[in-house]
Amino acid sequence: MKQAKPVVPRAEAALKRHFRTQRTHELVTANRTFPITARVDVQLALEKLFVDYANVKLLGIHPPYSQHETLTFAQVLGDQHNPVVIGPLQHAEVDIGEALPARCLRQAIWLSHEGRAPFALLVSTATSFGRLSGTHVEIAAPPGEAGSKLSRRLFDQLEVLVKRTASYRGKVISLEAADNYSGRAGVLRVHKLRDISRKARAAFIKELMRRSAQFYIQNGSNGQLRPDLNQALEEMLFSGGSLNAKFLGAEGLSRGTVH
């Protein structure tokens, strides 16, 4: 007697059940791609966003093959031969300069309702030819003005939450070309600055302001101080300030990597 093959739950079937009478090929989607530096902020923002919604379902999704392009709703709903299946939620650990790394979902779908209107939100890694380029967030809603307003409102709320989170605020980070040796995901490296005294910190800021003012006068800037400030940082940390960089614990940084 032959054993029946185990039934693997498909993401497409879950979406059809969620939207009920609405045909999935008629759904309208909108998406935004957040930069690499916002990956942790997007994760925290999504968690906060869905706190206000009841009966939320979070599904871990898995395409059959390694993704060289961004996973979208079109792929989830359109590929019958290589379906995207539902499985365990997978997280990537991302260094944010704290004692413990942050955990970010690799790819998942949230199912929920706003009032009576069903919607779905997909998060996945934005990739181009296999290279990470950010975090892809896509919202699927029924067609029509109501669905358009719903997705726009959700994105507006998400943007506000992302800006408020700022996981890397006050930290020095660099974009790394190679994979992180620790096994943690992401191409960001957080540099641990040395704990310096208040007096030394004040002296550094004072010198930075002095050089910024000097460049401001030399360059004849018209009310724009930021370029002169960047030029002063360039000089202090890279061009002629190896001792300053070492003192701040920022050795090894290359130009254009300080944020």
Image (tube, rainbow, N blue to C red):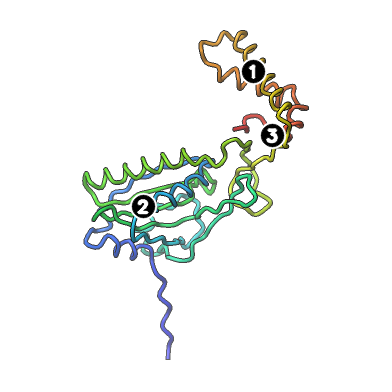
Give the SS element for disc 3: loop
Query: How many numbered marks does the figure carry?
Result: 3
- Estimate the x, y position of residue 183 in percent, counting from the top left: 65, 54
Q: Distance between the residues labelled 1 and 2?
A: 45 Å
Q: N-terminal of the two: label 1 or label 2?
A: 2
Q: N-terminal of the two: label 3 or label 2?
A: 2
Q: Is 159 left or right of 206, judged from the image as shown? A: left
The residue where tag 3 is placed is: 253
Question: Local crowd at mark 2 within 10 Å, few (<14), some, or many (≥20)?
Answer: few
In the image, residue 64 above or below residue 2: above
Q: Is 52 left or right of 230, judged from the image as shown? A: left
Label 1 amino acid? Met
Q: Distance between the residues labelled 3 and 2?
A: 42 Å
Q: Residue at x 70, y 29 (%)?
A: 198
Q: Which residue is drawn at 43% across and 86% down?
A: 3
The residue where tag 1 is placed is: 209
Front-most of 103 and 161? 161
Q: Which residue is drawn at 36% across and 59% down?
A: 56
- Any mark on residue 52, and which? 2
In the image, residue 180 above or below residue 256: below
**Which quadrant of the rendered structure holds the C terminus?**
top right
Tell me which corner region of the image, top left, top right, bottom left or bottom right, holds residue 208. Answer: top right
Q: N-terminal of the two: label 3 or label 1?
A: 1
Front-most of 2 and 90? 90
Front-most of 155 and 28? 155
**Which quadrant of the rendered structure holds the N terminus?**
bottom left
Mark 3 or 2, closer to the camera: 2
- Estimate the x, y position of residue 159 in percent, counting from the top left: 41, 40
